[in-house]
Image (cartoon, rainbow, N blue to C red):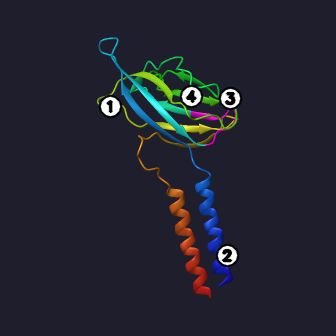
Amino acid sequence: MKRLLAGAAFCAACLAAGGAGAAATIQFTPVDLPDVTPGFDLWQYEYSVSGNFVAFGGFNVLFSPTLYAQLENPPPAINADWFASTLEPDPGLPADGLYSATALIGSPSLADKFIVSFVWLGNGTPGAQPFEVFDDSFNITESGRTRTPGQPVPEPGTLGLLAGALLLARRLSAKL
């Protein structure tokens, strides 16, 4: 019985740690802007970001060269805690463009929106994009997809831990 309780406590601790290390989420709201040049569909993304960032860590949002062009350069400033830049998508390579935000201090403010405008080359409304989170050595530590506000955050890791905990508890109880 002691093993069963110890295994359950261990699994509960793992689940709690998995939830506490809250992964970064990036929500986007697409805004259709007035087109300045005929034939160029001008849009803007407003990003709301959550997560924990270290000084000189940050995130990149990727822009496919087949769907995006003319990223605003430089993008609007966020606040004094962040530096933002853009890199144009290159259909000749092909290489994704990016919106990059780098924290200038540890635990930077995420209260303000991260904003970038672009020309949309696709049909309909622009949608979700891949993103990556990087540490202070520019190593990618996490990746995902932006989502619209109200979309649930997927947590496949938690489900895997729960399944493992149930399997462990079953094996331990079978031995007792």
Position of 1 with respect to 35 (left or right) is right
Q: Which residue is depicted at the point 43% across and 41% down?
A: 147
Residue type, numbered disc 1: Thr
Q: Position of residue 43 (x, y in %)?
A: 38, 23
3D distance between C-alphas at marks 4 and 3: 13 Å
3D distance between C-alphas at marks 3 and 1: 33 Å
3D distance between C-alphas at marks 4 and 1: 22 Å
Residue with the mark numbered 4: 100
Q: Residues within 10 Å of mark 1 (few under 14, many from 20)?
A: few
Q: Position of residue 164 (x, y in %)?
A: 56, 69
- Which type of secondary structure does the marked residue at label 2 adopt? helix
Residue type, numbered disc 4: Ser
Residue with the mark numbered 2: 6
Residue with the mark numbered 3: 104
Magenta stretch secondary structure, dominant: loop
Q: Is residue 21 above or below residue 105?
A: below
Q: Magenta span covers which residues? A: 52-59
- Which type of secondary structure does the marked residue at label 4 adopt? strand
Residue type, numbered disc 2: Ala
Q: Which residue is depicted at the point 54% across and 73% down?
A: 166
> Which of the two labelled residues, at mark 2 and mark 3, occupies the earlier sequence position?
2
Q: Are marks 4 and 1 in contact (CB under 8 Å)?
A: no
Q: Residues within 10 Å of mark 4 (few under 14, many from 20)?
A: many
Residue with the mark numbered 1: 125
3D distance between C-alphas at marks 4 and 2: 44 Å
| Residue 91 in sight | no
Foreground mark, 3 or 1? 3
Q: Residues within 10 Å of mark 3 (few under 14, many from 20)?
A: some
Q: Are marks 4 and 3 in contact (CB under 8 Å)?
A: no
> Which of the two labelled residues, at mark 1 and mark 2, occupies the earlier sequence position?
2
> Which of the two labelled residues, at mark 4 and mark 1, occupies the earlier sequence position?
4
Q: Residues within 10 Å of mark 2 (few under 14, many from 20)?
A: few
